[in-house]
């Protein structure tokens, strides 16, 4: 995002890594677009309307929400939020926004991809269940849709909008469910719930300022100044892989590391 881009572009090794990642992601988008076009009844002559609908689906599916004429607003939001277009894409993917426009042919192509996504997620939950994990189905819990094993959690692909669902459920019911004990209690005030939710979405620089000031990270855990600064410059996946290997040993940590490296969010609750 813009605010971090200006800083990191001044560091040659990191700037080169950013360019490589951007190239890789753009290549994935091009390949996805070509695959979708080939799935049309007449792939040699796609219309502009079909192309726009499929391109919107590719962007939403790769973390770039369709903001339309509000691009400048989203650019400004990067000064406060970390990757607002990613959050928007997660919500749009869940509500099926890519299916709203286009033609019958494009909706059929996109619907098939949604079906594959649902089947893949169901398969992952099924495998996890066979391996002894538990899945939370109550949206009042912060563990909603996460796979739990002991005090560790994995979030399967497609669960990015989970925190938003949890916030809406707590606002609607006025109740919250403790992720560790399962106890149902009265939720905090709507203002506090929304403030806590936004706190977890701050961009790294703003989050660092709040952490240094309060001594706690975005989820309320005590955090030293050295740890807060270190977290700012350490890739999140590397931190998670290190914690998994430290707590579970090299074999189990390596297995978790593969999932983490390919984008499966991981977290560990303190005993």
Image: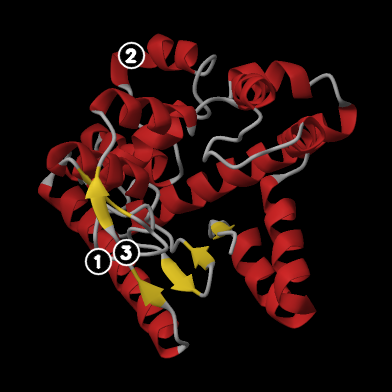
For the residues marked 3 and 2, what is the alpha-carbon distance in whole angstroms? 41 Å
State whether residue 253 is above or below residue 240.
below
Q: Of helix, strand and loop, which one carries label 2? A: helix
Give the residue number, with chain letter if any, for mark 2.
70
Give the residue number, with chain letter if any, for mark 1.
115
- Mark 2 burial class by Cα count in 10 Å: few <14, some 14-19, many 20+: few
Which x, y percent locates residue 199?
A: 47, 28
Quarter holding the C terminus is: bottom right
| Residue shown at the point (50%, 65%) measured from the top left | 153
For the residues marked 1 and 2, what is the alpha-carbon distance in whole angstroms? 30 Å
Q: Mark 1 vs mark 3: which is more N-terminal?
A: 1
Q: Of helix, strand and loop, which one carries label 1? A: helix
Can residue 44 be seen here? The reply is: yes
Give the residue number, with chain letter if any, for mark 3.
182
- Report the side of 251 relative to 81 (left or right): right
Which x, y percent locates residue 215?
A: 66, 29
Front tag of 3 and 2:
3
Q: Mark 1 vs mark 2: which is more N-terminal?
A: 2
Quarter occupied by residue 241: bottom right
- Report the side of 45 relative to 231 (left or right): left
| Residue shown at the point (53%, 68%) measured from the top left | 151
- Mark 3 burial class by Cα count in 10 Å: few <14, some 14-19, many 20+: few
For the residues marked 1 and 3, what is the alpha-carbon distance in whole angstroms? 32 Å
Q: Of helix, strand and loop, which one carries label 3? A: loop
Front in this rendered view, residue 192 or 238: 192
């Amino acid at each position: 995002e813009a605010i971090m881009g200006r800083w990191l572009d001044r560091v040659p090794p990191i700037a080169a890594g950013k360019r490589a990642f951007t190239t890789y992601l753009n290549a994935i988008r091009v390949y996805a677009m070509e695959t979708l076009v080939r799935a049309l009844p007449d792939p040699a002559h796609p219309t502009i309307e079909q192309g726009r609908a499929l391109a919107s689906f590719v962007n939403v599916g790769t973390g770039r929400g369709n903001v339309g004429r509000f691009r400048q607003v989203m650019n400004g939001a990067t000064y406060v939020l970390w990757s607002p277009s990613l959050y928007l894409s997660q919500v749009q993917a869940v509500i099926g926004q890519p299916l709203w426009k286009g033609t019958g042919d494009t909706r059929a192509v996109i619907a098939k991809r949604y079906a594959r996504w649902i089947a893949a997620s169901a398969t992952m939950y099924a495998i996890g269940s066979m391996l002894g994990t538990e899945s939370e189905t109550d949206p009042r819990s912060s563990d909603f849709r996460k796979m739990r094993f002991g005090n560790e959690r994995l979030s399967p692909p497609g669960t990015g909008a989970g925190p938003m669902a949890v916030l809406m459920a707590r606002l609607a019911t006025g109740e919250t469910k403790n992720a560790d004990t399962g106890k149902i209690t009265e939720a905090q005030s709507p203002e506090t719930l929304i403030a806590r939710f936004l706190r977890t979405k701050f961009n790294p620089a703003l989050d660092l300022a709040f952490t240094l000031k309060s001594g706690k990270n975005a989820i309320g855990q005590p955090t030293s100044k050295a740890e807060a600064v270190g977290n700012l410059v350490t890739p999140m996946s590397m931190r998670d892989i290190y914690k998994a290997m430290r707590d579970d040993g090299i074999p189990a940590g390596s297995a978790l590391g593969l999932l983490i490296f390919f984008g499966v969010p991981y977290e560990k609750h303190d005993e």
